[in-house]
Amino acid sequence: MASWTEQYLTAEQETELAAIAKAIVAPGKGILAADESTGTMGKRLTQINLENTEENRRTYRNLLFSPGAALAQHISGVILFHETFYQTADDGTPFPQKLIESGMIPGIKVDKGVVPLAGTKGEGTTQGLDGLSERCAQYKKDGAQFAKWRCVLKISDTTPSDLNICEVTNVLARYASICQQNGLVPIVEPEILPDGDQDLETCQKVTERVLSEQYRALVRHHVYLEGTLLKPNMCTAGHACTKKYTAAQNALATVTALRRSVPPAVPGVTFLSGGQSEEDATLNLNAINQVPGQRPWALTFSFGRALQASVLKAWAGLPNQVQKGQEELLRRAKSNGLAALGQYKGGADGAATGESLYVANHSY
């Protein structure tokens, strides 16, 4: 008969996880999501006429991470893709070590991508649980302190279905439990895509429904909430919605949804940008941190496109424009750091500041 040992976290494990989570959401800081897959990175490089080679991907990530302590003033952690995690900077330093030396925390994307969910109308789930514990153990040994797993849901007349919500929230809870057993803080990301013409009120209602189910699942799986972070969408209208809303309206809907579904034990919420322009994402985050009333969690950012669009455009793949790209990164990082404190005044112009970054059915 199989012998099972207790799988509960020790007090020491809980203390470590809570400390990591708290450091990631330190006041005025957020996360740089640089975990684009090889395919997604190829699409970004194509925009600046660069071939999608391993060396070009490494060169770009080296540009992102080289500002060091200057970047660490506003970026607490960086999410890496597997390939990047084991690449090195120009001076030969492994990227995770480079980040640690600069005062930033290395994280790792551990999911294996979205796949169709049978019995649904175009919905999906995320694969990668097989072998996850072993992979997490190795990443922890090699310097990672937190992890990310992304699931997606869609809003339509028939979605998200009960099946999709049940599947997604349980997959994320299982992932979170496995991460914590291996010393990694799990970022829980049930992203509701901005595809469609739904209004703000509909997005808020669906967000409340999904997040409520998410925390039920996390509790069922005995996940230590103080050692987790949430990465949700902001509540915004669908990309095709004809009605326009202000940042203050988006912010109130977002904070209301969080108040109704996210326990105060969770130390922080690190919003994804969801295809918003760089400036819109920052303005919405700033407004979120100005909503009156209780906000028991740190409310900050975990942006990919909204931190990198101007960087790519300014760099353009040219060696003599690396500094221009880094200046754009530092400008956007500072702007979002201020927004995480509710102190952003707007006007941080950049090479792609106002451009929509929306991609239908976006995948990493």
Image (cartoon, rainbow, N blue to C red):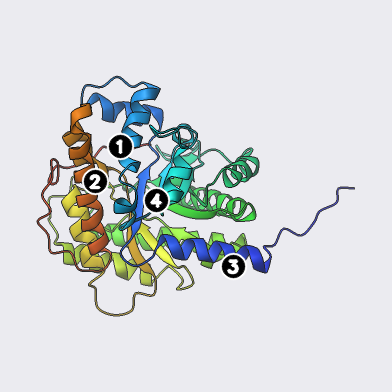
Q: Determine the CA span between mark 4 and mark 1.
A: 14 Å
Find residue 63 and name its label.
1
> Do tag 3 and tag 2 residues touch (Cβ < 8 Å)?
no
Q: Determine the CA span between mark 4 and mark 2.
A: 16 Å
Q: Mark 2 = which residue?
A: 329
- For the C terminus, which image quadrant? top left
> Which comes sooner in the sequence, label 4 or label 1?
1
Q: Mark 4 = which residue?
A: 102
> Do tag 4 and tag 3 residues touch (Cβ < 8 Å)?
no
Residue 356: x %, y % from top left = 17, 42
Q: Is residue 236 visible?
A: no
Residue 131: x %, y % from top left = 64, 38
Disc 2 is placed on an element classified as helix
Name the residue located 63 percent from the left edge and 51 percent from the top edge.
182
Q: Mark 3 = which residue?
A: 15
Name the residue located 24 percent from the left edge and 46 percent from the top edge.
329
> Do tag 2 and tag 1 residues touch (Cβ < 8 Å)?
yes
As drawn, the residue found furthest toward the bottom would be 293
> Which comes sooner in the sequence, label 3 or label 1?
3
Mark 3 or 1: in front is 1
User: Which one is in front, 209 or 33?
Assistant: 33
Asked if residue 75 lies left or right of residue 183, the reply is left
> Which comes sooner in the sequence, label 2 or label 1?
1
